[in-house]
Image (cartoon, rainbow, N blue to C red):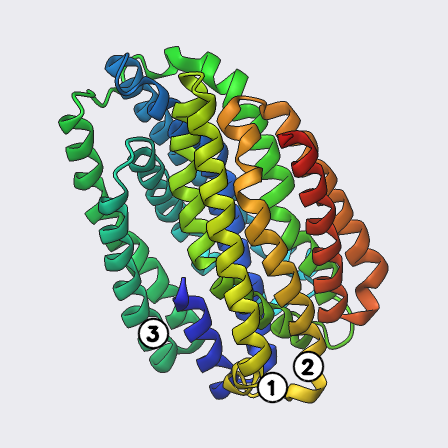
């Protein structure tokens, strides 16, 4: 997770803020497409493999096979679409024709990243958190070594090539870890007959996929609204830097949530109310404590963060102040956001995500003249309202 921040620091020093904007838009396209291809299936796999691993290993194996097939197929389709229509996307949607080449560069990486995400989701469903931690460490080392090296020698093209190499190597390492974990649980990974589990898709993954259609590309849509304005790439560069601050705060809370999903799913599956409440209380309390500590640190040392990216603390601090507030809200809301997923109320979760998406897009449209500041304000408003809705739903 630190790799984009390190890369952004280097780009800002070597190439300027506009180049950060170009990297941010392209990287955002890669991440959005990868999650769009796999996140609905991944949520289905994590939740249902956790529920079936002990009581019905054969079903769990078919679910794992179906998740890999569907994520791979969707990723290939999205990769081809982005490759074939890169000039239209860059010229007409983004109004930055020079980004077409970078979109073609990242198109094959979408497939590798989506499959890697699905393998991690299967491991999460098996609650193999130590294995996931080791794999993340390997992936992090690969990315931190490859991406800056590629950037130094070949600019943004080299950075994306390094990213793709790291994802590919990570996926090749993750595959045997996943199959080994399934074997240890007595779960046979099955592709034949995997689509017999289609009711899991219609009842669970489809609303999760629709939620992904609302959630994952929304950040990309909002940056697209702003990037076409005068000085758009520089404003997106500022916004992407601001998102690195959010990444720092949410690093630990998202790990907490990754652990929480299968634990909550097991609790709901066993109708164990005490376990659900204990897990939820633990995760919310942990995330709030992390958020309070992070806000305190940023209030004391926030200027140093801006200087890292060659920004003016006086001019740009309002943007980052809003991001610090929004990140603290998100940290507390993340565990609540898993309640619809873990309890099976997927269509309710979809409706809540739809409200968040609409608020963020409308807010960005109304505040687009304010550039990066308008983006972060719209995002903060959307997350604050969504948190209130999650609190009401959870109660």
Within 10 Å of disc 1 (Cα), the crowding (few <14, some 14-19, many 20+) is some
Q: Which mark is residue 311?
A: 1
Q: Of circles 3 and 1, which is in front?
A: 1
Q: How far is mark 1 from mark 2, CA to CA? A: 7 Å
| Residue 371 visible in the snapshot | yes
Query: Residue under circle 2?
Result: 316
Camera-side residue of 273 and 233: 273
At numbered mark 3, what does the secondary structure look like: helix, strand or loop? Answer: helix
Q: Quadrant of the C terminus?
A: top right
Rendered residue at 74%/70% (across/down): 373
* Labelled pair 1, 2 in contact (Cβ < 8 Å): yes
Q: Residue 131: x percent and y percent?
A: 22, 45
Q: In this view, does 360 lie to the left or right of 186?
A: right
Residue 179 place in picture, x, y as percent: 18, 33
Q: What element carries label 1?
A: loop
Decide which of 382, 277 is in the foreground and name it.
Answer: 277
Residue 151 lies in quadrant: bottom left
Disc 2 is placed on an element classified as helix
């Amino acid at each position: 997770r630190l790799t984009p921040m390190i890369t952004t620091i280097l780009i800002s020093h070597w190439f300027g803020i506009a180049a950060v904007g170009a990297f941010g838009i392209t990287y955002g396209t890669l991440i959005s497409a990868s999650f769009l291809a796999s996140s609905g299936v991944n949520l289905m796999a994590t939740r249902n493999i956790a529920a079936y691993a002990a009581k019905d290993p054969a079903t769990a194996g078919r679910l794992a096979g179906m998740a890999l097939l569907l994520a791979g197929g969707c990723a290939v389709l999205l990769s081809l679409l982005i490759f074939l229509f890169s000039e239209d996307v860059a010229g007409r949607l983004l109004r930055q024709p020079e980004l077409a080449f970078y979109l073609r560069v990242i198109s094959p990486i979408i497939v590798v990243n989506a499959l890697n995400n699905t393998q991690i989701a299967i491991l999460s469903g098996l609650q193999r958190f130590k294995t996931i931690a080791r794999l993340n460490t390997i992936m992090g080392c690969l990315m931190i070594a490859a991406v800056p090296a590629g950037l130094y020698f070949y600019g943004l093209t080299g950075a994306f090539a390094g990213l793709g190499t790291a994802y590919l190597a990570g996926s090749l390492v993750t595959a045997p870890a996943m199959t080994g974990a399934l074997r240890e649980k007595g779960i046979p990974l099955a592709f034949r007959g995997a689509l017999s589990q289609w009711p899991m898709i219609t009842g669970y993954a489809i609303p999760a996929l629709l939620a992904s259609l609302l959630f994952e590309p929304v950040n990309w849509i909002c940056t697209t609204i702003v990037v076409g304005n005068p000085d758009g790439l520089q404003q997106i560069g500022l916004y992407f830097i601001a998102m690195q601050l959010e990444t720092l705060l949410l690093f630990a809370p998202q790990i907490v949530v990754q652990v929480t999903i299968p634990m909550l799913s097991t609790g709901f599956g066993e109708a164990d109310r005490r376990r659900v409440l204990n897990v939820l209380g633990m995760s919310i309390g942990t995330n709030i404590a992390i958020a309070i500590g992070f806000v305190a640190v940023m209030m004391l040392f926030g200027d140093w963060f801006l200087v890292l990216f060659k920004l003016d603390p006086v001019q740009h601090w309002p943007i980052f102040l809003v991001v610090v507030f929004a990140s603290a809200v998100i940290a507390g809301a993340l565990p609540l956001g898993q309640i619809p997923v873990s309890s099976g109320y997927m269509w309710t979760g979809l409706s809540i995500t739809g409200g968040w998406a609409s608020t963020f897009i409308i807010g960005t449209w109304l505040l687009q003249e304010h550039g990066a500041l308008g983006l972060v304000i719209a995002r903060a408003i959307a997350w604050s309202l969504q948190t209130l809705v999650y609190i009401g739903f959870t109660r």
